[in-house]
Image (tube, rainbow, N blue to C red):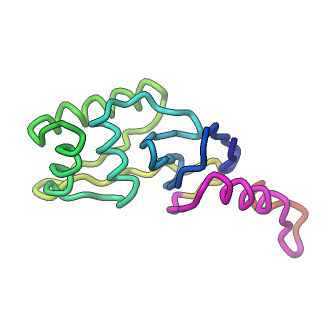
């Protein structure tokens, strides 16, 4: 189990992970989490969201390549983005995808529990040590920890 902010992730092995705000991505196998809860996405939906988490934005040619690798076609992009948006709305999350006309898609980053939207890369083991240390660090002249406000 690893911790990111106040969220915990149960990971059987130690795959590499990416965090962008409230979203996390394991690389092998690819799986998307929101605040530590795994999302039930199809392979094509996972491929699209993984691309957006990694890059923050993607042009149509990159999206087409990612979808093809997942066995889908760029012609199904509207259906895939609709399903992702519907699944995020179903769990009370904001719409994670912003369409840019004639360009591609941009990830709308929901802040994590600390209010951060930054990209963080590491393994579950690295993340656990990092966030445990961050919670126990006290800023000079303050009695609160970094994560408490």
**What residue is shown at x 66% (from left), y 42% (from top)?**
7
Residue at the (24%, 52%) spot, across then down: 105
Residue 11, image x, y percentages: 61, 40
Asked if residue 114 lies in the magenta stretch, the reply is no
Residue 135: where, in percent of width, then height? 80, 57
**Count of picture labels:** 0
Residue at the front extreme of this rendering: 13
Vertical comparison of 84 with 65: above or below: above
Q: Residue placed farthest to the top in the image? A: 90
Residue 67 placement: quadrant = top left
State the residue in front, 114 or 66: 66
Does residue 82 sit above or below 139 in this rendering?
above
Q: Residue furthest bottom?
A: 140
- In the image, 57: left or right of 76? right
Along the horizontal axis of the image, is 114 left or right of 139? left
**If the image is split into quadrants, where does the C terminus sit?**
bottom right
Side (left or right) of 136 relative to 90: right
Q: Which residues are magenta?
A: 117-141
Give how far across and how far down residue 97 sits, in percent: 31, 45
Where is residue 1? Give x, y as percent: 69, 41
- Image check: 61 left or right of 25? left
């Amino acid at each position: 189990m690893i911790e990111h902010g106040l969220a915990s992730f149960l990971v059987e092995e130690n795959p590499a992970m990416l965090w962008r705000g409230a979203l996390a991505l394991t690389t092998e196998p690819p799986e998307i989490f929101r605040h530590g809860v795994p999302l039930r996405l199809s392979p094509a939906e996972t491929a699209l969201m993984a691309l957006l988490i990694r890059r923050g934005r993607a042009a149509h040619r990159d999206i087409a390549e990612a979808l093809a690798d997942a066995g889908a076609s760029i012609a199904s992009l509207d259906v895939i983005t609709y399903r992702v948006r519907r699944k995020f709305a179903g769990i009370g999350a904001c719409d994670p995808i912003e369409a840019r006309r004639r360009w591609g898609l941009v990830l709308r980053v929901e802040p994590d529990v600390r209010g951060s939207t930054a990209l963080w890369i590491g393994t579950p083991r690295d993340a656990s040590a990092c966030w445990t240390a961050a919670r126990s660090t006290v800023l000079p002249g303050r009695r609160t920890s970094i994560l408490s406000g």
